[in-house]
Amino acid sequence: MAFWKQLLLSLLVLALAGGGWYFYEHRQQAAGGDASGGPVAAAPGGAGGQGGAAGGNRRGGLGGPTLVVTEPVGSDIVTDDVRAVGTVLVPQSINVYPQVTAEVMEVLFKAGDAVKKGQPLVRLDDSDQKAALDLAAVALSDAKKTLERSQKLASTNNLTLSALQDAQSAERRAEIGLLGAQIALDRRTVSAPFDGVVGISTLSVGDLVTPTTVITTLDDPSVMKVSFLIPERYAGRVEIGQAVTASAESKPDAVIKGSVSAIDTRVDATARTLKVEATLDAAAAQAIGVRPGMAVKVDLPFPGEKQLAVSALAIQWDRTGSYVWKLAGSDGVARAPISILQRQSGRVLVSSSDLAEGDKVVVEGLQRLRPGAKIAEAGQGGDQPQPAGQPAAKGS
């Protein structure tokens, strides 16, 4: 290609590049003209200025205050409850065993029966013991007669003192023999040691039982307790008589009232928990089918402290944590960091050194707020706020 053509092409490329650079540097001026080619900006107080302020006012931009909705900061009590799963106990709950090895002759109960103290539950074979009791009774009768004769002879000095003492000892041995025979006979009848309710038994007539054979279970449901564990940090706060509530899986909506009746003297060094027992309303527990050994949910409340409460809509988050916008002055906002303590329905309990009860916080219009932003509250002098120094627009 000829030299002059190369020079001409280079000049053309440079011209195009210069024009593009000029347009890029002046793009804001090029884009800022209005339809007539003039700039948008107008002298202060002109029509264009008012229109821009009004537009900024509606949009919440830099031209006017941001319209927001506020709510006052309230207060509520922070509840501090311990929730645990406990086991239902009854103070008197035993397995019933026989004291001897013998054959079952009669079963006198069925599962679920309410029995009284001393009521017979099972009769065992006692034929040998009855015979032994009869022999002991005869021996005692003979010993008494011998003692009477000896006493008469001794009164006339016809019997030595040692012979009289032997007769007295024989009578005493006969009494002890009769007592032993009666005890052996009584042990052939297994009776309830206290009032309660008997459980299921697998015994039947003819079974051979030993002192290790469980005849049945016996529980006294007139008093019911629940045993549960609480964290060691509550060891200094739990007290005898403190109210508790319990609920069973069989009827979770029913609440059983109770109170703390015993506190262990030691904290479990492994689990770092403290064992607590509470006495429940036995009638209410039985009404919903609570039985010994059943698991129940226990709620042990502790007195709470008064804390600030804000609407859940007011809370925002960023990388530094949670915060709210509170009103500062007549038309400003300030950021107030908070710590969330407890969530409730529509409200959140918080702690903050920058908030006080009664302060107003923004709940709507949060997206346009920045530190130092000007705001206007909805419903304060009209739904649409007016810029400072401008009269409200009159209807045409």
Image (tube, grey):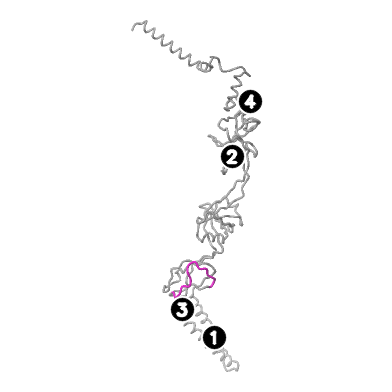
Give how far across and how far down residue 79 sits, in percent. 59, 47
The mark closer to the camera, 3 or 4, is 4
Side (left or right) of 188 relative to 323: left
Say which residue label 2 marks: 311
Classify 94 as above or below 307: below
Q: Residues within 10 Å of mark 2 (few under 14, many from 20)?
A: many
Marks 3,2: beta carbons within 8 A: no
**SS for callout 2:** strand
**Residue appearing at x 50%, y 17% in the figure:** 27
Q: Is residue 113 magenta?
A: yes
Q: Distance from label 3 to label 2 (Cα)? A: 80 Å
Say which residue label 3 marks: 126
Say which residue label 1 marks: 171
Marks 3,4: beta carbons within 8 A: no
Q: Distance from label 3 to label 4 (Cα)? A: 113 Å
> Which badge, 3 or 1, is on the more N-terminal residue?
3
Q: Distance from label 4 to label 2 (Cα)? A: 37 Å
Q: Quadrant of residue 349?
A: top right
Say which residue label 4 marks: 395
| Residue type highlighted by circle 4 | Gly
**Residue appearing at x 40%, y 9% in the figure:** 10
Give how far across and how far down residue 16 sits, in percent. 43, 12
Instruction: Count the marks.
Output: 4
